[in-house]
Amino acid sequence: MAAAKRGSGRATTIIDIARAAGVSKSTVSLVLKNSPHVRPVTRDRVERAFEQLGYVYNRSAANLRKAHSSFVGMVISDLMNPFFAELAVGIEDALYNLGFIPILANTNEDRERQAKVLQSMREHGVAGIILSPAGGTDAWGLTESLPRAIPAVLTMRRVEGSPLPYVGPDNRNGARQAVEHLISLGQRRIGFIGGYASNTTRVERLSGYRDALQAAGLPYDEALVFESMPTRSGGFDAITEALAAQARMTAVVCFNDVVAMGATRALGLRGIRIGRDFAVVGFDDIAEAEHNAPPLTTVSTDTRRMGARAARSLLGLIGGADPVSMSFMGETRLVVRESCGAGQGEFTREVG
Amino acid sequence: MAAAKRGSGRATTIIDIARAAGVSKSTVSLVLKNSPHVRPVTRDRVERAFEQLGYVYNRSAANLRKAHSSFVGMVISDLMNPFFAELAVGIEDALYNLGFIPILANTNEDRERQAKVLQSMREHGVAGIILSPAGGTDAWGLTESLPRAIPAVLTMRRVEGSPLPYVGPDNRNGARQAVEHLISLGQRRIGFIGGYASNTTRVERLSGYRDALQAAGLPYDEALVFESMPTRSGGFDAITEALAAQARMTAVVCFNDVVAMGATRALGLRGIRIGRDFAVVGFDDIAEAEHNAPPLTTVSTDTRRMGARAARSLLGLIGGADPVSMSFMGETRLVVRESCGAGQGEFTREVG
DNA sequence: CTGAAAGCGCTTACAG
DNA sequence: CTGAAAGCGCTTACAG
């Protein structure tokens, strides 16, 4: 009788607490939000009642009355991709620390699904949304599912023409760093492989690649760039295609790390020694990059921190900040490991 | 003026709709839940009002009145681990299809954090919880944060003594399959590496390993089993330790795939040819297993489907089903690729 | 410092 | 088939 009684009957509410503590429910509410306007004695009495009745705060009821809920929608384009899993972890962690709780959706790069979950999240009363848009998302479609009224930030994938704040790494500069490093190692025939040409992130990375080439007085050769799925097997295919096309390059920078891993594996299978015969550089620095064979030289995008940053931008928005000021571009950092062949000697063998 | 008006002012409610359509809000509510007791004409009028006013259903308000919400807590022990990411994707997908929406928490194997997020989820009024428990979670602690009243199912990691339904693969039989296959290939000195001894999943897998050894009349040799972190670097360390200890084995079954990948890499670095000199078998069949060098022979746990099954068990529970009947053990399947050396000839070289 | 009342946006009986 | 009223569990002014 003295113990908690939940589920079997009805849940304990602040009215039960008020009755038990001999105060009004307004007072209970004040205790709940840690108001300084409650006498310590009263607070104690109320808190003892919480204990005794096994009270659980009903946040949904509170949300109904408040300006916004503590839910945030987190929609991820491909959670099976370790890069986006890392992003999700970064967002989730930051959100909890900021007093919010994430509702998850994995769109799996499907725009229809994306539209549906966005709608569902609005119905569930999220305070805002962090979105890594599905491939091919356009500004118009986005405005449809995400009217101005609902705070939202885009992350990791820009959407051309969308007015939403964007948080992501400086892809262009990152690619430039990678290529510059390769050039400093004596490389001259450097390819770029992986990813779809329509992907805005790839567009940015590719222009960084061109920047570096140009700065070094090297020609941009279209025969050295290959599209593919942005996955392991995509990387495998892309490098295989490059080999077949006799592209005669001695190094590649890859759209991302999984592409680099796939390429690395295809090359290894042909007996090409990566880091000696041929150089490979990845992008993102996912956790597995350092465990690749050989360990991958890659451009770190500091993914988790970027996720946290997106969370903070969203909270800024919710708090009424100017959207324009909530965009953020993170610095990248080249992480030199073995696959680029730094300090391994000459690249004598042209592949392909 | 005729267009939607959200955010700037207040959101459109069923009262606005009722007024616009010339009906009462009860009728609007009936339309919302697709009741057959509304005349088509009336329904049409109401639906037109939805369109015109840009109505968004407020599910939280509805939840307040209904028996349960459409939120489900999904608490994952380590989302950075591709195995659990795959599990999360399976759960998420099933939940959406069943009309529920997942709230995500990544405990990162931290029990304190787990207790906190469980509490937070209850406050947010989840209809139930799917939990892959953090390492070291005990039945007592679990009952504290998860009273009987709230429907919950455990997945992928058993908790000794907990009355909660458990959904997971048949680890014991899976390990048996792996070892039997190795034995059929002529292997006799088979080790078991990776994972912590306290992990219930490892306990199950290890007993399957012993089962197969015993059935084949092979001795169980403690000197052939090595603990480690359940990660890539753990696998790297475990096999390195085994080599240093001169364990003289010619094959290992690994606690999971990432351990196998780490082991594979360490072995490769020493010039040991996996699948010829030495056999490695993983567990789980994560997506990357087939892209490993060499492709990993492993025990498939059908992780995504297992996640979906956990979701269905939870909904059963929410619907009032008997918890005992909601447990489920999934069949495992050996996926033979190259790392076990099937059809590659003799294992002549003892390693270590 | 505390209480009484209204309201958040729905659903749920209950009438008609 | 439709409407008027009460209620879900909180917060928010407003009194006192």
Image: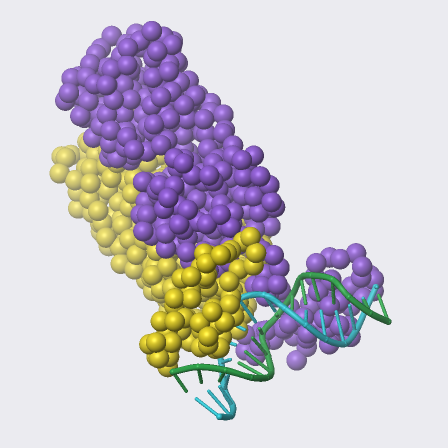
Chain colours: A purple, B yellow, C cyan, D green
Quarter in which the C terminus of chain B is drawn: top left
Give the number of marks: 0
Q: Where's residue B351, x and y in %?
A: 28, 30
Q: Nearer the viewer, residue B288 or A165?
A: A165
Q: Nearer the viewer, residue B276 or B83?
A: B83
Quarter of the view holding residue A218 = top left
Q: Is residue A1 above or below residue A84?
A: below
Q: Nearer the viewer, residue A32 or A348?
A: A32
Residue B5 is at least partly visible in this image: yes
Is A11 situated left or right of B328 in this image? Answer: right
Tell me which residue sits at (38%, 60%) in the image: B95
Quarter of the view holding residue A134 = top left
Tell me which residue sits at (49%, 29%) in the image: A329
Q: Where's residue B312, x and y in %?
A: 35, 65
Residue B84 is at least partly visible in this image: no
Q: Is residue B348 above or below residue B46?
A: above
Q: Where's residue B271, x and y in %?
A: 27, 24
Tell me which residue sits at (36%, 25%) in the image: A205
Quarter of the view holding residue A220 = top left
Is B265 situated left or right of C2 in this image? Answer: left
Q: Where's residue A191, x and y in %?
A: 27, 19
Tell me which residue sits at (49%, 75%) in the image: B25
Is B189 situated left or right of A142 in this image? Answer: left
